[in-house]
Image (cartoon, rainbow, N blue to C red):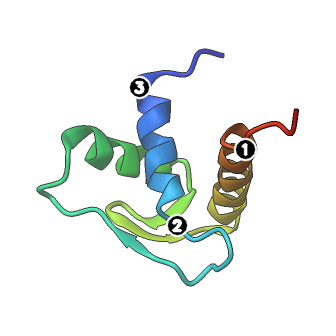
């Protein structure tokens, strides 16, 4: 599966949610970059967030945000060589 610009934008939105709390909300304003507005809408349509402009992560969205944070941590860690 290729990593498209659309997927990157969706990951940018998911990264905004705190991976340690369901209570962390996000609001994507109408003056945000068009690709982020579209990504937020897609995440809502995929039932990963509660509102078309952000809101809170659903249970699945929270799990995705946690996995994304873990992946980013792993990829950004320098090996101990």
Q: Locate residue 77 relative to residue 7 in the image: left or right.
A: right
The mark nearer the N terminus, 3 or 2, is 3
Say the numbered circle drawn on residue 5.
3
Quarter in which the C terminus is drawn: top right
Numbered disc 2: secondary structure: loop
Q: Nearer the viewer, residue 28 or 74?
A: 74
Q: Residue 68: x and y, percent? A: 66, 49
State if disc 1 and disc 3 touch (CB < 8 Å). no
Q: Residues within 10 Å of mark 3 (few under 14, many from 20)?
A: few
Q: Nearer the viewer, residue 78 or 61?
A: 78
Q: Quadrant of residue 66?
A: bottom right
- For residue 38, above or below residue 30: above
Q: Which residue is mark 2?
A: 17
Question: Which quarter of the image is occupied by the N terminus?
Answer: top right
At x 20%, y 45%, the residue is: 33
Q: Is residue 78 left or right of residue 34?
A: right
Badge 3 element = helix
Measured as percent of width and height from the top left, residue 53 is found at 32, 62
| Residue furthest bottom in the image | 23
| Outermost residue, front side | 81
Q: Where's residue 57, x and y in %?
A: 56, 68
Residue 24: horizontal and vertical position, in percent? 51, 79
Give the labeled residue for mark 1.
77
Tell me: residue 80, above or below residue 1: below
Q: CA distance from mark 3 to mark 2?
A: 20 Å
Question: Is disc 1 placed on a helix, strand or loop?
Answer: loop
Q: Mark 1 or 2, which is nearer the eye? A: 1
Tell me the crowding category of disc 2: few under 14, some 14 to 19, or many 20 or more residues within 10 angstroms, Cα based: many
Considering depth in this image, is 40 or 45 the residue closer to the camera? 40
Which comes sooner in the sequence, label 1 or label 2? 2
């Amino acid at each position: 599966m290729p990593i498209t610009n659309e997927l990157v934008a969706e990951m940018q939105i998911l990264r905004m949610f705190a991976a340690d709390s369901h209570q962390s909300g996000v609001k994507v304003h109408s003056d945000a970059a068009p690709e982020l507005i579209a990504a937020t809408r897609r995440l809502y349509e995929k039932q990963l967030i509660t509102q078309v402009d952000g809101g809170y992560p659903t249970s699945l969205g929270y799990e995705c945000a946690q996995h994304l944070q873990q992946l980013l941590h792993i990829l950004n860690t320098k090996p101990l060589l």
